[in-house]
Amino acid sequence: MLVLSASFAVFVLGAGVALGYFTGFATAVARRAWKDYKVTKKALPGLRKGAWATTRLAAGWIAAVAVIGVFIFYGMVQTDDEPRTPASVPSVEPS
């Protein structure tokens, strides 16, 4: 016959309660995760549409800034046929 001491019985009972608590907690977390997954899966088409809309908006702004940058760069490097001379510098002519 197996004789258990009182301290061992309390340990086994405590371990069982702890194991049951953590198992129940993990099960609750898993159920909540599946519920959130199902809700998100239903909302996915709308979220995807919004993501593409904001991406197109950002791409439009990037394109606009790029076009403006090209015009600014082109204006900076464009040269005339005649060299530009500042008005404050007198021209030196040989005598």
Image (tube, rainbow, N blue to C red):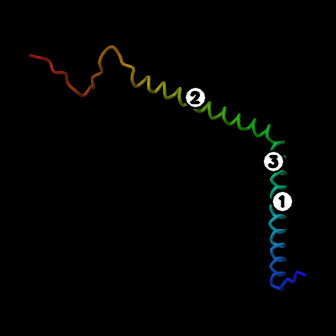
Spatial distance from mark 3 to mark 2, Cα to Cα?
36 Å
As shown in the figure, which amino acid type bears the numbered disc 1? Thr
Q: Circle 3 — which element?
A: helix
Task: Please report contact status of discs 1 and 2: CB closer than 8 Å, yes or no.
Answer: no
Q: Tell whether 76 sits left or right of 40.
A: left
Picture residue at 39% right of the left edge, 20% below the top: 78
Q: Which mark is residue 37?
A: 3
Q: Which mark is residue 27?
A: 1
Q: Position of residue 82 (x, y in %)?
A: 31, 15
Residue occupied by mark 2? 63
Q: Position of residue 89 (x, y in %)?
A: 22, 27
Spatial distance from mark 1 to mark 2, Cα to Cα?
50 Å
- Pick out the residue farthest to the right: 1
Q: Tell whether 37 sits left or right of 78.
A: right
Judging depth in this view, the residue of 50 and 35 nearest the camera is 35
Dot 2: few (<14), some (14–19), or many (≥20) neighbours within 10 Å? Answer: few
